[in-house]
Image (cartoon, rainbow, N blue to C red):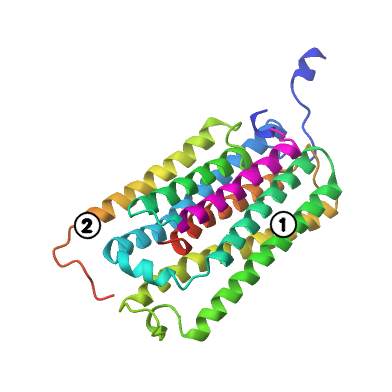
Amino acid sequence: MSGHHISSVKFLWGIALSLVVLTVVTVLAAWMHFPEPWNVVVKLAIATVKAFIVASFFMNLWWDSKFNVLLLAISIVFFFIMVGITLLDTLYRTDPIPLF
Amino acid sequence: MSQSSAIPKKGDHVQEHFVNSNQQFEAAKLGMWIFLVTEILFFGGLFVAYIVYRSWYPELYILASDHLDVWLGAINTTVLIGSSLTVALAIRCAQTNYTRGIIINLCVTIALACVFMVIKYFEYSEKFELGILPGAHYTYEGIAHEKANIFYSIYYMMTGLHGVHVIVGIGLMVWLVIRANKGHFSSEYYTPVEITGLYWHLVDIIWIFLFPLFYLID
């Protein structure tokens, strides 16, 4: 019965609270003005942790069929392929800036 | 008799082509996850646009993002986290046969989603008054960068598409409340609640990335 995990009310509130705390942390991190590239890296790292928490414990992937986890992982892999191949073009143009 | 007790009895909600309720539930959830994959790549294209333009004009993003209110963004992030919590609680209520709890939690979710949209409306209308409009309609002079309209085109496209998803989510939630009110959901059958929940959490995850990428630059 992998699809019928029942979380306790306390657990769900704890997850939501941890997400709020991480939101506060990310706003505080913005005020710290880390030198670039760390500024972006820190914020994306926190966002990734938050997304991981939501996917694992609100979307129940932690207890779910591994095939659903695989689907999510594949979508992320293909997203990075899309980013990578696009940047291979746009970062190395000799005349980089288009009209728009 | 011992043979038949090993196979769970089919409930009324189980379609002919499924072995049992659990198989039907898992199949529906798998289908939803495949849809969510297409959603991730749908938004993914816009994230690629964001990344490409940020790599071309890093200074533009720092200048333009000053005009977005961090507080409103942070409040909206918290509102969406709260709505994800109430959806998860609604699913728990369905799993424990507490119909009133499903309705209450879904109504709170709808209310929080409306709060999100109202805040978004105030943000948008404030920008529209300044002439911060997407693309060729951009007339604001306050950002010292010739490509400021590009940043806001991407901003409107991404937050706008996200907003459309929130509105669709509100519609789905209203439909769930109506069905829950008719007593359609129980621990035996709550697939629509579970699946709408998955959709709603994905909408939350997308906002979790949009918030730092637009509001928290610099």
Percent coordinates x, y for residue B177 in the rendering: 78, 56
**What is the span of residues highlighted in magenta in the rendered image?**
A5-31
Q: Is residue B136 above or below residue B217?
A: below
Asked whether residue B18 appears in the rendered view, the answer is no
Asked if the magenta segment contains residue A16, the reply would be yes
| Label tally | 2
Asked if the magenta segment contains residue A46, the reply would be no
Q: Residues within 10 Å of mark 2 (few under 14, many from 20)?
A: few
Q: Residue at x 76, y 57 (%)?
A: B108
Q: Which of B43/A24 is in front? A: A24
Q: Which of B211/B35 is in front? A: B211
- Dominant SS in magenta: helix
Q: Residues within 10 Å of mark 1 (few under 14, many from 20)?
A: many
- Residue occupied by mark 2: A89
Percent coordinates x, y for residue B80 in the rendering: 63, 56
The quadrant where residue B150 appears? bottom left
Specify the farthest residue to the left. A94
Q: Residue at x 42, y 48 (%)?
A: A42
The quadrant where residue B56 appears? bottom left
Q: Is residue B56 above or below residue B184?
A: below
Identify residue type, mark 2.
Asp
Q: Residue at x 13, y 63 (%)?
A: A94
| Residues at circles 1 and 2 in contact by the CB criterion of under 8 Å | no
- Residue occupied by mark 1: B109
Q: Is residue B18 left or right of residue A25?
A: right
Q: Is residue B68 above or below residue A8?
A: below
Image quarter (top left, top right, bottom left or bottom right) of the N terminus of chain A = top right
Dot 1 falls on which chain?
A: B
Percent coordinates x, y for residue B39 in the rendering: 50, 54
Tell me the element at label 1.
Answer: helix
Identify residue type, mark 1.
Thr
